[in-house]
């Protein structure tokens, strides 16, 4: 998933809505990685705010270099601020922060996968309430669980056409939700 360049551009304008969106979207993901790194709970929010402020201040300098550029940039900012935190503490991080900051390392690949799964899960939760339970179940069973439309139709008691339309409608809504956030 790619982060929208238009949304990133608006971040540098300082709009409160875009800051809140950035904070709401990325704070839980960053908190999870800070926890994994061994940052005490009392310090996580401060580091998250520092990381997100760097994103806002330096987003104009961000260079799109292809798929995954923003998440790699964010990962590097997180790793650097986490290193800075541990330099002033008597405890060591519980992950290799150089590996997290690096490109094409095992830890950076885990970050990339978790980032994409996290953003996709947030989008799924955001649109689920827009659909009837049967429509949502038909979508989930096809897309998430990988069942064939005919199997899903028999399972949920919908026609084959209704199951295919359910998938199409939910995917259309997901694309609309993610437009402006990921491309």
Image (tube, grey):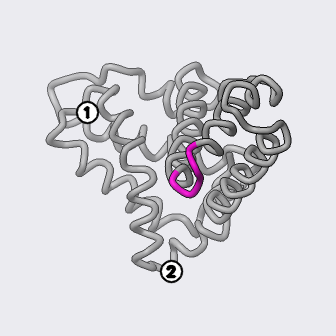
- Where, by quadrant of the figure, is residue 36 drawn? top left
Indicate the secondary structure of the residue bearing disc 2.
loop
Where does the C terminus fall, quadrant-wise?
bottom right
Indicate the secondary structure of the residue bearing disc 1.
helix
Using the image, tell me which numbered label, if any, was put on residue 115. Answer: none
Looking at this view, is 149 or 59 the one in front? Answer: 149
Q: Is residue 182 left or right of residue 100?
A: right
Mark 1 neighbour class, 10 Å CA radius: few under 14, some 14 to 19, many 20 or more: some
Image height of 24 relative to 133, above or below: below
Looking at this view, is 182 or 154 the one in front? Answer: 154
- Residue drawn at (31%, 19%), measured in percent from left and top? 94
Segment colored magenta: 129-133
Which residue is tagged 1?
Answer: 86
Task: Confirm whether the magenta stretch covers residue 130.
Answer: yes
Q: Is residue 157 left or right of residue 26?
A: right
- Residue drawn at (85%, 43%), measured in percent from left and top? 161
Task: Confirm whether the magenta stretch covers residue 45.
Answer: no
**Main SS type for the magenta part?**
loop
Residue 139: % across, % down: 68, 39
Which residue is tagged 2?
Answer: 13
- Residue drawn at (37%, 49%), measured in percent from left and top? 27
Image height of 128 relative to 54, above or below: above
Structural distance between the alpha carbons of marks 1 and 2: 32 Å
Image height of 90 relative to 9, above or below: above
Q: Is residue 136 left or right of residue 40?
A: right
Looking at this view, is 79 or 120 the one in front? Answer: 120
Residue 82: % across, % down: 33, 38
Please identify, in this view, whether the residue under mark 1 or under mark 2 is nearer the observer: 2
Residue 87: % across, % down: 25, 34
Mark 2 neighbour class, 10 Å CA radius: few under 14, some 14 to 19, many 20 or more: some
- Residue drawn at (49%, 29%), measured in percent from left and top? 100
Residue 48: % across, % down: 32, 50
């Amino acid at each position: 998933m790619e982060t929208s360049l238009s949304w990133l551009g608006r971040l540098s304008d300082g709009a409160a809505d875009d800051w809140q969106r950035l904070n709401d979207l990325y704070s839980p993901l960053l908190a999870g990685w800070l926890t994994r790194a061994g940052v005490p709970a009392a310090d996580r929010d401060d580091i998250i705010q520092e990381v997100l402020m760097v994103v806002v201040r330096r987003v104009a300098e961000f260079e799109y270099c292809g798929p995954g550029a923003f998440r790699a940039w964010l990962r590097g900012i997180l790793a650097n601020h986490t290193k800075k935190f541990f330099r002033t503490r008597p405890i060591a991080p519980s992950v290799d922060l150089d590996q997290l900051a690096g490109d094409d390392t095992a830890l950076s690949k885990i970050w990339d996968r978790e980032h994409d799964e996290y953003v996709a899960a947030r989008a799924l939760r955001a649109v689920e309430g827009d659909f009837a339970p049967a429509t949502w179940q038909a979508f989930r069973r096809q897309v998430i669980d990988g069942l064939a439309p005919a199997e899903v139709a028999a399972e949920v008691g919908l026609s084959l056409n209704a199951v295919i339309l359910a998938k199409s409608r939910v995917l259309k809504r997901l694309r609309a939700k993610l437009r402006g956030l990921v491309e």
